[in-house]
Image (tube, grey):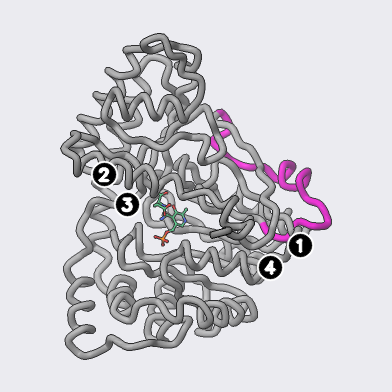
């Protein structure tokens, strides 16, 4: 059958593909350590699971409003108000089947063919693909490890044309773990105002911050910043609820209403049971979130210092999220069994086949000099996996 032009150009999600490959090898009995997907290894907290069970037992198992139930919108509004002192109304909140789905809807209701969307690199794999699906043009803003993987106001200005519509921000960042200070965000907000950009602020890692400083949410910066921002977040990372598929957008009511229509014509509603569970996640005890952060911090400290002690590896110390993104380009040009390793895909294949450790090539995030390692996995696997990386690289 002849596929559409879109289907023929669409790339699979590299993060999901690597994870599936590692699982398949494991099912065949190969001892693989998986550093692929950004998926916390912790179980979903008990109080959240209980809320889901109660939802099933009480028969809350039917269609809901397309954009989510009012009680969950209220729980989200209260969470944002408590954490960031930002006020939204119910008609400024949309709940979708994960933040990925929310972002997909956002690009589709905002972007017309030819509109340009600014995406800082290294970026999360799905942004450029989703922009392309919506008919837009991704415009990449490259950053360097030396500059903490941060974009500057000059850079934004230099890439703006009359077609530029949206600036995507993601901090703490997947894949680098970099984040912005309030002063840096204020500068970005000033350019966004000057160039009249919509800011799509994906803050899904807002609770996983190591600096000790409070995360600053973009709409917190000023009334103007709030008016031009669509805030995106969800339960996957903070509450270890990746499989429950709940994400949300908060912002301009026209945008929210259009997304509501799109959901109504495509996915109907996010799962009723997961919505009840998410109410408990946002409104119940936040104790588990702090406990998970302590564990992530221990892993981050270990993994970044271990990697920085491997010859030729340069690893930025993350400020948040649960990824490290080391520069491994020192190994390009080196040979194994007569074959030269020349890019991040070949290095990743070498680590998988020779070292039995699965990581994601940096090129998928827009930076071929790097690989991404997710440390949302057990300390035992981190110790074994990083040892394998070191020993395998030493073979080159
Ligand atoms: N944004 C970023 C930056 C991510 O890393 C992810 C990966 N899970 C998502 C959005 C999507 O999350 P989910 O769909 O699980 O809510
Ligand atoms: N966002 C996670 C990651 O980057 C999960 C996989 C995905 O949604 O792409 O690994």
> What residue sits 34% from the left and 26% below the top?
351
- 57 horizontally vs 185: left or right: left
**Within the magenta stretch, is there residue 57?**
no
Return the residue nearer the eye: 262 or 45.
262
Separation of residues labelled 2 and 1 (CA atoms): 47 Å
- Magenta segment range? 146-166
Q: Are marks 2 and 3 in contact (CB under 8 Å)?
A: no
Looking at marks 3 and 1 on the same chain, the residue that comes earlier in the sequence is marked by: 3
The outermost residue toward the front is: 1
List the residue tagged with mark 4: 224
Kind of element beneath mark 4? helix
Cβ of mark 3 under 8 Å from ligand 2: the answer is yes
Cβ of mark 2 under 8 Å from ligand 2: the answer is no
- Place of residue 353 in the rendered image (x, y in percent of width and height, measured from the top left): 31, 27
Given this view, does label 4 or label 2 mark the residue nearer the observer?
Answer: 2
Residue 128 seen:
no
Q: Are marks 4 and 3 in contact (CB under 8 Å)?
A: no
Looking at marks 4 and 2 on the same chain, the residue that comes earlier in the sequence is marked by: 2
Separation of residues labelled 4 and 3 (CA atoms): 34 Å
- 252 horizontally vs 193: left or right: left
Q: Which mark is residue 24?
A: 2
Cβ of mark 4 under 8 Å from ligand 1: the answer is no
The outermost residue toward the right is: 162
Given this view, does label 2 or label 1 mark the residue nearer the observer?
Answer: 2
> What residue sits 30% from the left and 20% below the top?
390
Kind of element beneath mark 1? loop
Q: Which mark is residue 39?
A: 3
Q: Which mark is residue 196?
A: 1
Separation of residues labelled 2 and 3 (CA atoms): 17 Å
């Amino acid at each position: 059958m002849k596929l559409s032009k879109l289907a023929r150009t669409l790339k699979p999600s590299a993060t999901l593909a690597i994870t599936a490959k590692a699982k398949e090898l494991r099912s065949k009995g190969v001892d693989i350590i998986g550093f692929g997907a950004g998926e916390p290894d912790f179980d979903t907290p008990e109080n959240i699971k209980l809320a889901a069970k109660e939802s099933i037992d009480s028969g809350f198992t039917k269609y809901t409003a397309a954009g989510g139930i009012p009680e969950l919108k209220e729980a989200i509004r209260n969470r944002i108000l408590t954490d960031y002192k930002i006020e939204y109304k119910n008609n400024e909140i949309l709940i979708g089947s994960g933040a990925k789905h929310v972002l997909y809807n956002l690009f589709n209701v905002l972007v017309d063919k030819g509109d340009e969307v600014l995406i800082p690199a290294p970026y999360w794999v799905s942004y450029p693909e989703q922009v392309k699906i919506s008919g837009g043009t991704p415009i990449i803003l490259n950053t360097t490890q030396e500059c903490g993987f941060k974009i500057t106001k000059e850079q934004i200005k230099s890439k703006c044309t009359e077609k530029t519509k949206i600036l995507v921000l993601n901090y703490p960042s997947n894949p680098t773990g970099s984040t912005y200070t309030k002063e840096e965000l204020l500068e970005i907000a000033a350019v966004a105002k000057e160039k009249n950009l919509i800011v799509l602020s994906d803050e899904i890692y807002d609770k996983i911050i190591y600096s000790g400083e409070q995360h600053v949410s973009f709409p917190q910066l000023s009334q103007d910043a709030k008016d031009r921002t669509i805030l995106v977040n969800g339960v996957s990372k903070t509450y270890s609820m990746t499989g429950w598929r709940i994400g949300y957008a908060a912002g301009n009511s026209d945008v929210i209403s259009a997304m509501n229509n799109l959901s109504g014509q495509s996915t109907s509603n996010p799962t009723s049971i997961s919505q009840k569970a998410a109410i408990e996640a946002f409104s119940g005890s936040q104790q588990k979130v702090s406990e998970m952060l302590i564990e992530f911090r221990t892993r981050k400290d270990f993994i970044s210092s271990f990697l920085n002690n491997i010859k030729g590896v340069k690893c930025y110390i993350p400020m948040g999220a649960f990824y490290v993104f080391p520069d491994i380009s020192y190994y390009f040009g080196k040979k194994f069994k007569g074959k030269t390793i020349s890019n991040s895909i070949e290095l990743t294949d070498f680590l998988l086949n020779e070292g039995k450790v699965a990581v994601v090539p940096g090129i998928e995030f827009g930076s071929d000099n790097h690989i991404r390692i997710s440390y949302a996995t057990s300390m035992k696997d981190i110790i074994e996996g990083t040892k394998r990386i070191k020993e395998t690289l030493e073979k080159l």
